[in-house]
Image: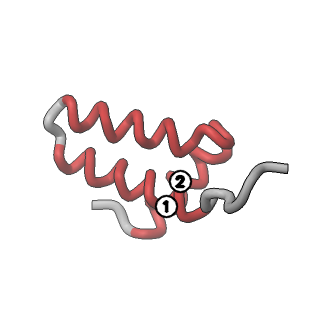
Amino acid sequence: MLSDYEVGRAAAALVHEFGEYAEVEAARYADLMLGQSNRPGLLIWARIWRTIAEMHPAQKGLPH
């Protein structure tokens, strides 16, 4: 299992590489792990996905 530090580094690397689409990429990898019945991999990618979501909270209100 990855430490919180390692998950944070992985999340930051995805954000650096994919920008605003990093959350989608993490979700895609989590889905791949689910499709392969790889529960440990799914849990890791779900943690990375959640960390990215926490780094970039959803915008509130109407767009300007």
* Element carrying mark 2: helix
Q: Please tell me how many numbered marks the rendered image carries.
A: 2
- Residue reaching furthest to the bottom: 4
Circle 1 Cα neighbour tier, 10 Å, few/some/many (<14 / 14–19 / ≥20): many
Q: Residue at x 68, y 58 (%)?
A: 59
Answer above or below: position of 39 versus 58.
above
Left or right: 41 as drawn, with respect to 22: left
Residue 60 vs residue 10, the one in the foreground: 60
- Residue reaching furthest to the left: 37
Q: For residue 26, which quarter of the picture?
A: top left
Question: Which numbered tag is attached to residue 11?
Answer: 2
Circle 2 Cα neighbour tier, 10 Å, few/some/many (<14 / 14–19 / ≥20): many
Q: CA distance from mark 1 to mark 2?
A: 6 Å
Q: Residue at x 22, y 37 (%)?
A: 34
Left or right: 14 as drawn, with respect to 7: right
Residue type, mark 2 in image: Ala
Residue 45 vs residue 21, the one in the foreground: 21
* Element carrying mark 1: helix
Label 1–label 2 contact, CB within 8 A: yes
Q: Position of residue 49 (x, y in %)?
A: 44, 52
